[in-house]
């Protein structure tokens, strides 16, 4: 089976697709910064954030009060119409597919600001049928509104059923741009005993075995990553489909150290970015999801030393071969994409 990257997709969509369909360039999306378009103070800050963050996302779902759903949708239309987003992508998180608001979210946003919207984030995705539904609606609304480029889809992985179906979700449509972990809803759906929005838990740990049977003696304790399994599963599904995996929200805004650790673990496991719930988290995400100067320098040395890319060489006492070259190229390519 051949694995397509998003660049290879875009066979014409089913319903009246506008032509020509664009290719999707790999665009940096290290921080997806959430704002509430129904909150005038927050909305007023959006134009000044253009260029400081890879993605600005107008959130219509959880964290927006039921009474404010219409105001949030209308606020996003207003901001999008009045703002030139330049290099920053504009995304939205629509309400969930079982809510009374989602149909109007899609109709209003695609027909009124479809040309400005890059990605629609779909919460609580359970299986590929949810993506097929949104894909078909987007195609119809794009055709109706004369939208000139296909709007992409990003799924949030935040139900146990969604995790079980993650491969099918990733491959469900040529519009799939990526998947984010939704640790808060996922924890509730799985009946995990946590109360936080992402991040760790001090009780989830392993302890070194007792020395000489002394269970009260000094024993090293390590806190474990609650999200390792799901992130790794999501990363594999995204790699297979040629789309992008993301960590999600880290709700303790004050704990910048733990946020950075969680983001870095996700980066090392293959994620390309994360959500930002506060401007403080943008700086952390931009730094963590960019390869470091030392890593790029080392990767370039290996690429150079490997010449035609075959065989093995010794560098600083370490064996490098075709496979380590491929790993180094991941870092070099990412550095070039971010610099472009
Ligand atoms: C995000 O939506 C989450 O539930 O963590
Ligand atoms: Mg959620």
Image (tube, rainbow, N blue to C red):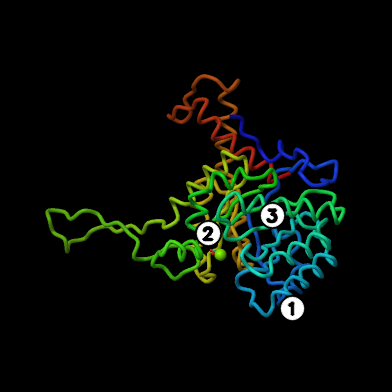
Q: Is residue 280 left or right of residue 222?
A: right
Q: Are marks 3 and 1 in contact (CB under 8 Å)?
A: no
| Pair 3/1: label in front | 3
Q: Quadrant of residue 211?
A: bottom left
CA separation in Å, label 3 and label 1:
29 Å
Vertical side of 65 occupied by 97: above or below: above
Q: Residue at x 51, y 19 (%)?
A: 311
CA separation in Å, label 1 and label 2:
29 Å
Q: Residues within 10 Å of mark 1 (few under 14, many from 20)?
A: few
| Percent x, y of residue 66 | 64, 77
On the image, numbered disc 2 is attached to which residue?
A: 158
Observer-nearest residue: 150 or 89? 150
| Pair 3/2: label in front | 3
Q: Residue at x 17, y 64 (%)?
A: 216
Label 2 CB less than 8 angstroms from ligand 1: yes
Tag 1's secondary structure?
helix
N-terminal label among 1 and 2: 1
Label 1 CB less than 8 angstroms from ligand 1: no
Q: Are marks 1 and 2 in contact (CB under 8 Å)?
A: no
Total of numbered circles in the picture? 3
Tag 3's secondary structure?
helix
Residue lying at the far bottom of the rendered structure: 67
On the image, numbered disc 1 is attached to which residue?
A: 40
Q: Quadrant of residue 249?
A: bottom right
| Percent x, y of residue 61 | 64, 68
Q: Are marks 3 and 2 in contact (CB under 8 Å)?
A: no
Vertical side of 7 occupied by 150: above or below: below
Q: Quick check: which quadrant has ligand 2?
A: bottom right
Residue 134, disc: 3
N-terminal label among 3 and 1: 1
């Amino acid at each position: 089976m051949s694995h397509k990257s998003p660049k290879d997709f875009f066979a014409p969509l089913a319903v009246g697709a506008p032509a020509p369909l664009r290719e999707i360039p790999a665009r940096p999306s290290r921080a997806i910064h959430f704002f509430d378009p129904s909150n005038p103070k927050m909305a007023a800050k959006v134009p000044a954030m253009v260029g400081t963050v890879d993605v600005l996302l107008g959130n219509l779902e959880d964290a927006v009060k039921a009474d404010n759903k219409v105001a949030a949708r209308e606020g996003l239309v207003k901001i999008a119409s009045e703002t030139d987003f330049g290099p920053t992508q504009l995304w939205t998180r629509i309400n969930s597919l079982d809510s009374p608001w989602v149909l109007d979210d899609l109709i209003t946003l695609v027909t009124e600001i479809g040309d400005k919207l890059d990605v629609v984030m779909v919460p609580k995705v359970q299986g590929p049928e949810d993506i097929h539904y949104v894909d078909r609606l987007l195609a119809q609304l794009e055709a109706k509104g004369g939208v000139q480029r296909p709007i992409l889809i990003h799924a949030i992985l935040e139900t146990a059923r969604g995790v079980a179906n993650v491969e099918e979700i990733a491959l469900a449509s040529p519009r799939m741009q990526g998947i984010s972990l939704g640790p808060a809803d996922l924890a509730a759906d799985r009946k995990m005993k946590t109360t936080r929005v992402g991040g760790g838990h001090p009780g989830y740990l392993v302890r070194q075995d007792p020395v000489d049977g002394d269970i009260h003696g000094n024993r090293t304790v390590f806190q474990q990553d609650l999200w390792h399994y799901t992130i790794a599963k999501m990363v594999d599904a995204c790699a297979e489909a040629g789309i992008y995996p993301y960590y999600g929200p880290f709700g303790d805004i004050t704990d910048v150290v733990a946020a950075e650790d969680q983001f870095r673990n996700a980066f090392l496991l293959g994620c390309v970015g994360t959500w930002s719930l506060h401007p403080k988290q943008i700086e952390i995400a931009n730094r963590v999801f960019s390869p470091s100067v030392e890593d790029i320098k080392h990767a370039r040395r290996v690429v150079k030393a490997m010449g035609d890319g075959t065989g093995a060489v010794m560098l600083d006492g370490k064996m490098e071969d075709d496979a380590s070259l491929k790993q180094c190229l991941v870092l070099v390519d990412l550095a070039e994409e971010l610099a472009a």
